[in-house]
Amino acid sequence: MSLDLSSSLPWSRARAGLGAVAIVLSAVSAVGPVHAAWEPTRPVEFVVPAGTGGGADQMARFIQGVVTRHSLMKQPLVVVNKSGGAGAEGFLQIKDARRDPHKLVITLSNLFTTPLGTGVPVNWKDMTPVAMLALDQFVLWVNADSPHKSAGDYLEAVRSAPDHTFKMAGTGSKQEDQIITVALQKAAGRKLIYVPFKGGGDVAVQLVGNHVDSTVNNPIEAVAHWRSGKLRPLCVFDDERMPYKAKITDTLSWNDIPSCKESGIPVDYLMMRGIFMPPGVTAEQVAWYVELFRKVRATPEWQEFLEKGAFKDSFMTGNAYIDWVAKAEELHRALMRDAGFIAK
């Protein structure tokens, strides 16, 4: 399986139905630093459509801290977790908050997988795209006491065992973790037991406790356990290694983790970390938040956060962001159809 969402090349087919969203974002893409009169007049709710401790939650709370420390907003930025219905609760709240510029949501791939897998009536076109902040990697992790020292060892062990021998923990059902698990099953020719949890933090704890055999957590969700010697990374689900060479443990950096491709596992997957607002907000309001996130990204803390979490630095706004999201939706539709995850 190959899901390369690192490119922002224009999506060629017509974007029917984008309506006012495209108009708003076209205006945003043309503005420079914001000197507009509008700014938030009450606390801004920053919705995380996932549980606590996961990658989206950690990024949202990090942004909240940066905004507070650098006084980038006069009003508080309040992080709220809405994980119900595989994130549908959070997305529906944003969809229903029409014209309310005091709500944001940080998105992950459940922006696509939840509507496709559950049939819940929400789509990214029901919200207003603001900005992509970064792309997130996935890593194949095992417990540090596992006999599997490499991705090749792990794959061969799965191949040699009967179906439903190995347990894979992941965030949610019919979402990115399970999509990757299905791809691993195809590469191994064996079925795994997939065990869903509410968030990446819970998933990591399950592996630390040896209750499952592996996970495909994001780097930021497992790095503390890797640093403490409790988990072992086997490969990153990309066609190249991560660029960060600073040591995370006494001997290893993110760059020392081989790509799954070079390890003989033909699976790659990148996930966005992006921001949306409710429908019907104005171009001036969107532009204010675009500038806010530009300021966050300009801080030294952001660069340190990217490296520690091994993110791919990728910032998009305007039509480039719309094109990327549309392309990502079509790719997820194809992957979920192939995995049999589309709601009937």
Image: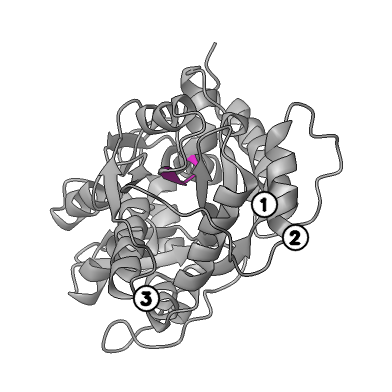
Q: Residue at x 80, y 45 (%)?
A: 11
The spot of residue 91 in percent (x, y) is 44, 32
- Tell which tag, 2 or 1, sits nearer the viewer: 2
The spot of residue 191 in percent (x, y) is 42, 34
Nearer to us in this view, 103 or 1: 103
Give the amino acid type for the residue marked by disc 3 in the picture.
Lys
Crowd around label 2: few <14 · some 14–19 · many ≥20 (10 Å): few
Nearer to us in this view, 85 or 43: 43
Q: Residue at x 30, y 35 (%)?
A: 82
Q: Residue at x 66, y 32 (%)?
A: 334
What's drawn in magenta, residue-wise?
A: 103-109
Q: Quadrant of residue 232?
A: bottom left
Count of numbered circles in the view = 3
- Reading the chain from its start, which is encountered first: label 2 or label 1? 2
The answer for how far apart the CA atoms under marks 2 and 1 are is: 13 Å
Q: Which residue is mark 3?
A: 308
Q: Secondary structure at mark 3?
A: helix
Q: Is residue 169 above or below residue 91?
A: below
Q: In the rendered view of the protein, which quadrant contains the C terminus?
A: top right
Q: Do labels 2 and 1 touch, CB within 8 Å?
A: no
Q: Report if residue 104 lies within the magenta region.
A: yes
- Reading the chain from its start, which is encountered first: label 2 or label 3? 2
Q: Which residue is mark 1?
A: 321
Nearer to us in this view, 279 or 190: 279
Give the amino acid type for the residue marked by disc 1 in the picture.
Tyr
The spot of residue 38 in percent (x, y) is 51, 53
Q: Residue at x 45, y 42 (%)?
A: 181
The answer for how far apart the CA atoms under marks 1 and 3 are is: 25 Å
- Reading the chain from its start, which is encountered first: label 1 or label 3? 3
Q: Is residue 18 above or below residue 56?
A: above
Q: Which residue is mark 2?
A: 30
Q: Quadrant of residue 129?
A: top right
